[in-house]
Image (cartoon, helix red, strand yellow):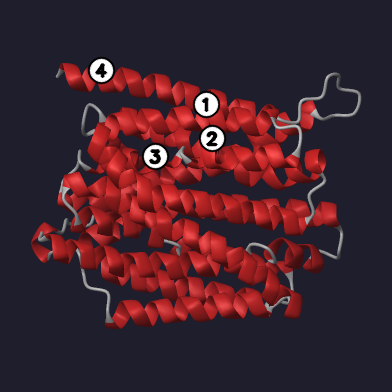
Protein backbone atom coordinates (compact mmCIF):
# COMPACT_ATOMS: atom_id res chain seq x y z
CA UNK A 1 0.00 0.00 0.00
CA UNK A 2 1.36 3.41 -0.91
CA UNK A 3 2.46 5.65 1.87
CA UNK A 4 -0.10 8.39 1.08
CA UNK A 5 -2.97 5.91 1.08
CA UNK A 6 -1.72 4.46 4.37
CA UNK A 7 -1.55 7.97 5.89
CA UNK A 8 -5.10 8.70 4.75
CA UNK A 9 -6.33 5.47 6.32
CA UNK A 10 -4.62 6.39 9.60
CA UNK A 11 -6.33 9.79 9.53
CA UNK A 12 -9.73 8.21 8.92
CA UNK A 13 -9.45 5.69 11.74
CA UNK A 14 -7.89 8.27 14.08
CA UNK A 15 -11.04 10.40 13.79
CA UNK A 16 -13.29 7.38 14.40
CA UNK A 17 -11.44 6.35 17.55
CA UNK A 18 -11.06 9.95 18.78
CA UNK A 19 -14.81 10.60 18.59
CA UNK A 20 -15.48 7.25 20.26
CA UNK A 21 -13.07 7.98 23.13
CA UNK A 22 -14.41 11.51 23.53
CA UNK A 23 -17.89 10.08 24.05
CA UNK A 24 -16.59 7.56 26.57
CA UNK A 25 -14.47 10.15 28.37
CA UNK A 26 -17.38 12.56 28.70
CA UNK A 27 -19.44 10.12 30.78
CA UNK A 28 -16.59 9.04 33.09
CA UNK A 29 -17.02 11.81 35.69
CA UNK A 30 -20.81 11.50 35.88
CA UNK A 31 -21.71 7.81 35.41
CA UNK A 32 -20.70 6.68 38.95
CA UNK A 33 -22.66 9.61 40.41
CA UNK A 34 -25.73 8.68 38.35
CA UNK A 35 -25.49 5.06 39.48
CA UNK A 36 -25.32 6.13 43.14
CA UNK A 37 -28.27 8.48 42.63
CA UNK A 38 -30.42 5.75 41.05
CA UNK A 39 -29.36 3.31 43.78
CA UNK A 40 -31.05 5.39 46.47
CA UNK A 41 -28.13 7.69 47.25
CA UNK A 42 -26.25 5.06 49.28
CA UNK A 43 -22.55 5.38 48.25
CA UNK A 44 -21.65 1.85 49.38
CA UNK A 45 -24.53 0.20 47.53
CA UNK A 46 -23.94 2.44 44.52
CA UNK A 47 -20.28 1.41 44.43
CA UNK A 48 -21.27 -2.26 44.41
CA UNK A 49 -23.73 -1.67 41.58
CA UNK A 50 -21.14 0.29 39.61
CA UNK A 51 -18.65 -2.53 40.10
CA UNK A 52 -21.26 -4.97 38.76
CA UNK A 53 -21.67 -2.78 35.68
CA UNK A 54 -17.92 -2.88 35.04
CA UNK A 55 -17.74 -6.63 35.47
CA UNK A 56 -20.74 -7.21 33.21
CA UNK A 57 -19.27 -4.96 30.53
CA UNK A 58 -15.98 -6.89 30.67
CA UNK A 59 -17.86 -10.20 30.50
CA UNK A 60 -19.73 -9.08 27.37
CA UNK A 61 -16.45 -8.03 25.81
CA UNK A 62 -14.85 -11.37 26.66
CA UNK A 63 -17.72 -13.30 25.11
CA UNK A 64 -18.36 -11.18 22.03
CA UNK A 65 -15.03 -9.60 21.00
CA UNK A 66 -14.01 -12.79 19.13
CA UNK A 67 -17.36 -12.83 17.32
CA UNK A 68 -16.97 -9.19 16.30
CA UNK A 69 -13.43 -9.85 15.09
CA UNK A 70 -14.49 -12.82 12.98
CA UNK A 71 -17.40 -10.88 11.50
CA UNK A 72 -15.02 -8.10 10.46
CA UNK A 73 -12.75 -10.71 8.80
CA UNK A 74 -15.75 -11.95 6.81
CA UNK A 75 -17.66 -8.76 5.97
CA UNK A 76 -15.01 -6.04 6.36
CA UNK A 77 -14.06 -3.50 9.01
CA UNK A 78 -16.31 -0.64 7.89
CA UNK A 79 -19.75 -2.20 8.59
CA UNK A 80 -18.61 -3.40 12.01
CA UNK A 81 -17.36 0.08 12.93
CA UNK A 82 -20.66 1.59 11.79
CA UNK A 83 -22.72 -0.85 13.86
CA UNK A 84 -20.48 -0.12 16.86
CA UNK A 85 -21.04 3.64 16.55
CA UNK A 86 -24.82 3.15 16.36
CA UNK A 87 -24.77 0.74 19.29
CA UNK A 88 -22.76 3.10 21.48
CA UNK A 89 -25.04 5.98 20.55
CA UNK A 90 -28.10 3.95 21.54
CA UNK A 91 -26.38 2.98 24.81
CA UNK A 92 -25.77 6.64 25.73
CA UNK A 93 -29.36 7.57 24.89
CA UNK A 94 -30.69 4.72 27.06
CA UNK A 95 -28.53 5.97 29.94
CA UNK A 96 -29.65 9.56 29.38
CA UNK A 97 -33.27 8.46 29.77
CA UNK A 98 -32.78 5.63 32.30
CA UNK A 99 -35.18 5.96 35.27
CA UNK A 100 -33.67 3.01 37.18
CA UNK A 101 -30.42 1.11 37.53
CA UNK A 102 -32.08 -1.72 35.62
CA UNK A 103 -32.26 0.47 32.53
CA UNK A 104 -28.65 1.49 33.02
CA UNK A 105 -27.79 -2.20 33.14
CA UNK A 106 -29.55 -2.71 29.79
CA UNK A 107 -27.42 0.09 28.39
CA UNK A 108 -24.21 -1.48 29.66
CA UNK A 109 -25.12 -4.86 28.16
CA UNK A 110 -25.84 -3.19 24.84
CA UNK A 111 -22.56 -1.31 25.04
CA UNK A 112 -20.63 -4.48 25.82
CA UNK A 113 -22.20 -6.23 22.84
CA UNK A 114 -21.47 -3.48 20.33
CA UNK A 115 -18.33 -1.76 21.66
CA UNK A 116 -16.19 -3.24 18.93
CA UNK A 117 -14.53 -0.08 17.66
CA UNK A 118 -11.24 -0.73 19.46
CA UNK A 119 -10.95 -4.34 18.27
CA UNK A 120 -11.87 -3.42 14.72
CA UNK A 121 -9.72 -0.27 14.68
CA UNK A 122 -6.59 -2.30 15.43
CA UNK A 123 -7.51 -4.71 12.63
CA UNK A 124 -8.07 -1.69 10.35
CA UNK A 125 -4.56 -0.44 11.11
CA UNK A 126 -3.11 -3.89 10.41
CA UNK A 127 -4.88 -3.89 7.02
CA UNK A 128 -3.69 -0.42 6.10
CA UNK A 129 -0.01 -0.47 7.07
CA UNK A 130 3.09 -2.45 6.27
CA UNK A 131 4.71 -4.49 9.06
CA UNK A 132 7.35 -1.78 9.50
CA UNK A 133 4.71 0.95 9.84
CA UNK A 134 2.40 -1.02 12.10
CA UNK A 135 3.80 -0.11 15.53
CA UNK A 136 3.65 3.59 14.61
CA UNK A 137 0.09 3.10 13.36
CA UNK A 138 -0.96 1.50 16.62
CA UNK A 139 0.73 4.42 18.38
CA UNK A 140 -1.53 6.82 16.46
CA UNK A 141 -4.53 4.97 17.89
CA UNK A 142 -2.99 5.28 21.35
CA UNK A 143 -2.73 9.04 20.81
CA UNK A 144 -6.45 9.15 19.89
CA UNK A 145 -7.27 7.27 23.13
CA UNK A 146 -5.18 9.71 25.16
CA UNK A 147 -6.60 12.83 23.51
CA UNK A 148 -10.14 11.58 24.06
CA UNK A 149 -9.43 10.98 27.73
CA UNK A 150 -7.75 14.36 28.16
CA UNK A 151 -10.62 16.38 26.71
CA UNK A 152 -13.54 14.09 27.52
CA UNK A 153 -13.52 14.03 31.35
CA UNK A 154 -13.09 17.81 31.59
CA UNK A 155 -15.99 18.41 29.21
CA UNK A 156 -18.07 15.77 30.98
CA UNK A 157 -17.50 17.35 34.38
CA UNK A 158 -18.53 20.77 33.05
CA UNK A 159 -21.63 19.38 31.30
CA UNK A 160 -22.55 17.38 34.41
CA UNK A 161 -22.54 20.57 36.48
CA UNK A 162 -25.27 21.87 34.16
CA UNK A 163 -27.34 18.68 34.14
CA UNK A 164 -26.41 15.11 35.19
CA UNK A 165 -28.00 13.75 32.01
CA UNK A 166 -26.45 16.22 29.57
CA UNK A 167 -23.09 14.36 29.20
CA UNK A 168 -24.94 11.28 27.94
CA UNK A 169 -26.84 13.26 25.32
CA UNK A 170 -23.59 14.84 24.10
CA UNK A 171 -21.82 11.46 24.05
CA UNK A 172 -24.72 9.97 22.10
CA UNK A 173 -24.56 12.83 19.61
CA UNK A 174 -20.83 12.25 19.11
CA UNK A 175 -21.48 8.56 18.41
CA UNK A 176 -24.13 9.40 15.83
CA UNK A 177 -21.78 11.93 14.20
CA UNK A 178 -19.16 9.20 14.19
CA UNK A 179 -21.62 6.93 12.36
CA UNK A 180 -22.26 9.62 9.74
CA UNK A 181 -18.52 10.22 9.35
CA UNK A 182 -17.93 6.53 8.85
CA UNK A 183 -20.86 6.09 6.49
CA UNK A 184 -19.88 8.92 4.14
CA UNK A 185 -16.10 9.12 4.48
CA UNK A 186 -14.47 6.02 6.07
CA UNK A 187 -13.21 3.62 3.36
CA UNK A 188 -13.10 -0.15 3.71
CA UNK A 189 -9.62 -1.45 4.57
CA UNK A 190 -10.04 -5.19 3.95
CA UNK A 191 -10.16 -6.20 0.30
CA UNK A 192 -12.74 -8.83 -0.67
CA UNK A 193 -9.96 -11.15 -1.82
CA UNK A 194 -8.47 -11.18 1.68
CA UNK A 195 -11.66 -11.97 3.59
CA UNK A 196 -12.09 -15.24 5.45
CA UNK A 197 -15.08 -17.54 5.72
CA UNK A 198 -17.05 -17.13 8.93
CA UNK A 199 -16.89 -19.97 11.45
CA UNK A 200 -18.87 -20.18 14.70
CA UNK A 201 -16.27 -22.62 16.00
CA UNK A 202 -13.56 -19.97 15.71
CA UNK A 203 -15.75 -17.10 16.89
CA UNK A 204 -16.26 -18.04 20.54
CA UNK A 205 -13.75 -17.04 23.24
CA UNK A 206 -12.17 -20.50 23.43
CA UNK A 207 -12.10 -20.95 19.65
CA UNK A 208 -10.58 -17.52 19.09
CA UNK A 209 -7.81 -18.20 21.58
CA UNK A 210 -6.85 -21.30 19.59
CA UNK A 211 -5.54 -18.88 16.96
CA UNK A 212 -2.89 -17.83 19.47
CA UNK A 213 -1.34 -21.30 19.18
CA UNK A 214 -0.98 -21.04 15.41
CA UNK A 215 2.53 -19.60 15.62
CA UNK A 216 5.31 -20.63 18.03
CA UNK A 217 5.74 -17.06 19.30
CA UNK A 218 2.12 -15.88 19.23
CA UNK A 219 0.94 -17.60 22.42
CA UNK A 220 3.93 -16.19 24.32
CA UNK A 221 3.18 -12.69 23.03
CA UNK A 222 -0.48 -13.14 24.00
CA UNK A 223 0.53 -13.95 27.58
CA UNK A 224 2.64 -10.78 27.64
CA UNK A 225 -0.43 -8.92 26.44
CA UNK A 226 -2.47 -10.38 29.29
CA UNK A 227 0.15 -9.34 31.87
CA UNK A 228 0.28 -5.87 30.34
CA UNK A 229 -3.50 -5.47 30.54
CA UNK A 230 -3.63 -6.93 34.05
CA UNK A 231 -1.04 -4.47 35.38
CA UNK A 232 -2.95 -1.60 33.77
CA UNK A 233 -6.04 -2.68 35.70
CA UNK A 234 -4.60 -1.27 38.93
CA UNK A 235 -5.24 2.26 37.66
CA UNK A 236 -8.96 1.81 37.02
CA UNK A 237 -9.38 -0.30 40.17
CA UNK A 238 -7.77 1.74 42.95
CA UNK A 239 -6.46 5.05 41.57
CA UNK A 240 -9.38 7.19 42.75
CA UNK A 241 -9.51 5.45 46.13
CA UNK A 242 -5.75 5.74 46.54
CA UNK A 243 -5.66 9.45 45.66
CA UNK A 244 -8.40 10.27 48.15
CA UNK A 245 -6.98 8.10 50.94
CA UNK A 246 -3.30 9.01 50.68
CA UNK A 247 -3.36 12.57 49.34
CA UNK A 248 -6.86 13.79 50.21
CA UNK A 249 -7.62 14.55 46.55
CA UNK A 250 -11.10 15.77 45.65
CA UNK A 251 -12.74 15.06 42.24
CA UNK A 252 -11.20 18.20 40.75
CA UNK A 253 -7.67 17.07 41.65
CA UNK A 254 -8.42 13.56 40.40
CA UNK A 255 -9.58 15.06 37.10
CA UNK A 256 -6.42 17.17 36.88
CA UNK A 257 -4.31 14.08 37.45
CA UNK A 258 -6.16 12.17 34.73
CA UNK A 259 -5.59 15.10 32.40
CA UNK A 260 -1.84 14.97 33.09
CA UNK A 261 -1.80 11.22 32.45
CA UNK A 262 -3.60 11.72 29.15
CA UNK A 263 -1.29 14.51 28.00
CA UNK A 264 1.94 12.65 28.66
CA UNK A 265 0.57 9.38 27.32
CA UNK A 266 -0.51 11.15 24.15
CA UNK A 267 2.98 12.60 23.69
CA UNK A 268 4.52 9.14 24.00
CA UNK A 269 1.98 7.41 21.78
CA UNK A 270 1.85 10.07 19.10
CA UNK A 271 5.40 11.37 19.11
CA UNK A 272 7.89 8.89 20.55
CA UNK A 273 6.88 5.42 19.47
CA UNK A 274 7.70 5.86 15.78
CA UNK A 275 11.30 7.15 16.27
CA UNK A 276 12.04 4.76 19.15
CA UNK A 277 10.88 1.68 17.23
CA UNK A 278 12.71 2.85 14.13
CA UNK A 279 15.89 3.32 16.16
CA UNK A 280 15.98 0.19 18.34
CA UNK A 281 13.30 -2.14 16.93
CA UNK A 282 10.10 -3.57 18.35
CA UNK A 283 11.51 -6.10 20.81
CA UNK A 284 13.82 -3.60 22.49
CA UNK A 285 11.05 -0.99 22.56
CA UNK A 286 8.82 -3.54 24.25
CA UNK A 287 11.45 -4.27 26.90
CA UNK A 288 12.16 -0.57 27.43
CA UNK A 289 8.46 0.15 27.89
CA UNK A 290 8.08 -2.58 30.50
CA UNK A 291 11.09 -1.25 32.42
CA UNK A 292 9.63 2.25 32.52
CA UNK A 293 6.32 0.75 33.68
CA UNK A 294 8.09 -1.01 36.55
CA UNK A 295 9.79 2.22 37.60
CA UNK A 296 6.57 4.22 37.22
CA UNK A 297 4.43 1.90 39.35
CA UNK A 298 7.15 1.74 42.00
CA UNK A 299 7.24 5.54 42.07
CA UNK A 300 3.43 5.71 42.35
CA UNK A 301 3.43 3.34 45.31
CA UNK A 302 6.32 5.13 47.03
CA UNK A 303 5.07 8.70 46.56
CA UNK A 304 4.06 9.98 49.98
CA UNK A 305 2.70 13.33 48.74
CA UNK A 306 0.59 14.26 45.74
CA UNK A 307 3.22 16.31 43.92
CA UNK A 308 5.57 13.30 43.97
CA UNK A 309 2.85 11.22 42.32
CA UNK A 310 2.46 13.90 39.63
CA UNK A 311 6.22 13.96 39.04
CA UNK A 312 6.11 10.21 38.35
CA UNK A 313 3.48 10.52 35.62
CA UNK A 314 5.94 11.27 32.75
CA UNK A 315 7.96 8.22 33.80
CA UNK A 316 4.84 6.05 33.83
CA UNK A 317 3.75 7.41 30.43
CA UNK A 318 6.88 5.89 28.88
CA UNK A 319 5.36 2.49 29.68
CA UNK A 320 3.35 3.24 26.52
CA UNK A 321 6.43 2.33 24.48
CA UNK A 322 5.51 -1.33 25.11
CA UNK A 323 1.91 -1.51 23.93
CA UNK A 324 2.14 -0.69 20.23
CA UNK A 325 5.24 -2.82 19.51
CA UNK A 326 3.54 -5.73 21.26
CA UNK A 327 0.43 -5.29 19.10
CA UNK A 328 2.62 -5.06 16.01
CA UNK A 329 4.64 -8.20 16.83
CA UNK A 330 1.40 -10.15 17.27
CA UNK A 331 -0.19 -8.85 14.08
CA UNK A 332 2.85 -9.82 12.02
CA UNK A 333 2.35 -13.47 12.91
CA UNK A 334 -1.05 -13.92 11.26
CA UNK A 335 -2.30 -13.29 7.73
CA UNK A 336 -4.51 -10.48 6.44
CA UNK A 337 -7.64 -12.62 6.65
CA UNK A 338 -7.07 -13.31 10.37
CA UNK A 339 -6.36 -9.80 11.68
CA UNK A 340 -9.93 -9.43 12.93
CA UNK A 341 -9.80 -12.77 14.74
CA UNK A 342 -6.49 -11.79 16.30
CA UNK A 343 -7.85 -8.48 17.56
CA UNK A 344 -10.96 -10.31 18.77
CA UNK A 345 -8.71 -12.65 20.74
CA UNK A 346 -6.89 -9.59 22.09
CA UNK A 347 -10.25 -8.18 23.11
CA UNK A 348 -10.99 -11.37 25.03
CA UNK A 349 -7.58 -11.20 26.71
CA UNK A 350 -8.25 -7.61 27.74
CA UNK A 351 -11.73 -8.47 29.01
CA UNK A 352 -10.37 -11.43 30.99
CA UNK A 353 -7.83 -9.15 32.65
CA UNK A 354 -10.61 -6.66 33.43
CA UNK A 355 -12.60 -9.43 35.07
CA UNK A 356 -9.65 -10.32 37.33
CA UNK A 357 -8.04 -6.94 38.03
CA UNK A 358 -10.69 -5.22 40.19
CA UNK A 359 -10.93 -8.04 42.72
CA UNK A 360 -7.18 -8.61 42.78
CA UNK A 361 -6.04 -5.01 43.29
CA UNK A 362 -8.87 -3.83 45.54
CA UNK A 363 -8.36 -6.86 47.80
CA UNK A 364 -4.64 -6.13 48.11
CA UNK A 365 -5.40 -2.45 48.74
CA UNK A 366 -8.01 -3.22 51.40
CA UNK A 367 -5.70 -5.72 53.14
CA UNK A 368 -2.81 -3.26 53.46
CA UNK A 369 -4.86 -0.29 54.71
CA UNK A 370 -7.08 -2.26 57.11
CA UNK A 371 -7.50 -0.69 60.57
CA UNK A 372 -4.86 -1.99 62.95
CA UNK A 373 -2.53 -3.02 60.12
CA UNK A 374 1.02 -2.05 60.99
CA UNK A 375 2.69 -0.82 58.99
CA UNK A 376 0.06 0.25 56.49
CA UNK A 377 1.11 0.06 52.86
CA UNK A 378 -1.43 1.84 50.61
CA UNK A 379 0.97 1.63 47.65
CA UNK A 380 0.88 -2.20 47.72
CA UNK A 381 -1.36 -2.54 44.60
CA UNK A 382 1.13 -0.49 42.57
CA UNK A 383 4.00 -2.64 43.81
CA UNK A 384 2.04 -5.71 42.71
CA UNK A 385 1.54 -4.16 39.27
CA UNK A 386 5.30 -3.52 39.09
CA UNK A 387 5.96 -7.19 39.89
CA UNK A 388 3.55 -8.25 37.13
CA UNK A 389 5.44 -6.09 34.65
CA UNK A 390 8.75 -7.45 35.95
CA UNK A 391 7.51 -10.93 35.02
CA UNK A 392 6.45 -9.60 31.61
CA UNK A 393 9.88 -8.02 31.08
CA UNK A 394 11.65 -11.26 31.99
CA UNK A 395 9.51 -13.27 29.59
CA UNK A 396 10.02 -10.65 26.87
CA UNK A 397 13.78 -10.95 27.21
CA UNK A 398 13.55 -14.74 26.92
CA UNK A 399 11.32 -14.51 23.83
CA UNK A 400 13.61 -11.92 22.25
CA UNK A 401 16.61 -14.17 22.68
CA UNK A 402 14.73 -17.10 21.17
CA UNK A 403 13.66 -14.95 18.21
CA UNK A 404 17.26 -13.89 17.58
CA UNK A 405 18.46 -17.50 17.79
CA UNK A 406 16.10 -18.64 15.01
On the image, the x and y values in percent for residue 24 come to 54, 65
| Mark 2 burial class by Cα count in 10 Å: few <14, some 14-19, many 20+ | many
User: Is the residue under label 2 in contact with that under label 1 (CB below 8 Å)?
Assistant: yes
| Displayed quadrant of residue 164 | bottom right
- Specify the label residue 388 is tagged with: 1
The residue where tag 4 is placed is: 401
Q: Name the quadrant containing residue 72.
A: bottom left
Q: Distance between the residues labelled 2 and 3?
A: 15 Å
What residue sits 55% from the left and 72% below the top?
Answer: 91
Element type at marker 4? helix
Q: In which quarter of the image is the N terminus?
A: bottom left
Q: How far apart are marks 1 and 4 (CA)?
A: 20 Å
Q: Mark 3 points at which residue?
A: 321
Tell me the mark number nearer the camera, choosing from 2 and 3: 3
Question: Mark 4 Cα within 10 Å, few/some/many (few <14, many 20+)?
Answer: few
Decide which of tag 1 and tag 4 comes sooner along the chain. 1
Q: Which mark is in front, 3 or 4?
A: 3
Residue 231's disc is 2
Mark 3 residue element: helix
Give how far across and how far down residue 398 sits, in percent: 32, 17
> CB atoms at circles 3 and 4 under 8 Å apart?
no
Amino acid sequence: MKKTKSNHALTFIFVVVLLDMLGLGIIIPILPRLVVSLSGGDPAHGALVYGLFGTLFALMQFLFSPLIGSISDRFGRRPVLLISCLGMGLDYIVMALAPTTGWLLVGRVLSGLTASSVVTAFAYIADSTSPKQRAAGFGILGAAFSLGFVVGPGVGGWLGSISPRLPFWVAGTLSLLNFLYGYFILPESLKASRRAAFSWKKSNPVGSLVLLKSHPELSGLAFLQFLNYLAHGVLSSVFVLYGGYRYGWDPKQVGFTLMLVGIFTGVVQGGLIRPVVKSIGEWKSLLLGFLFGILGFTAFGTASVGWAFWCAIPLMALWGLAGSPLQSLMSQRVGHSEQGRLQGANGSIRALSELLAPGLFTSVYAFFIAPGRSPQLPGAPFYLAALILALAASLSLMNYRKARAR
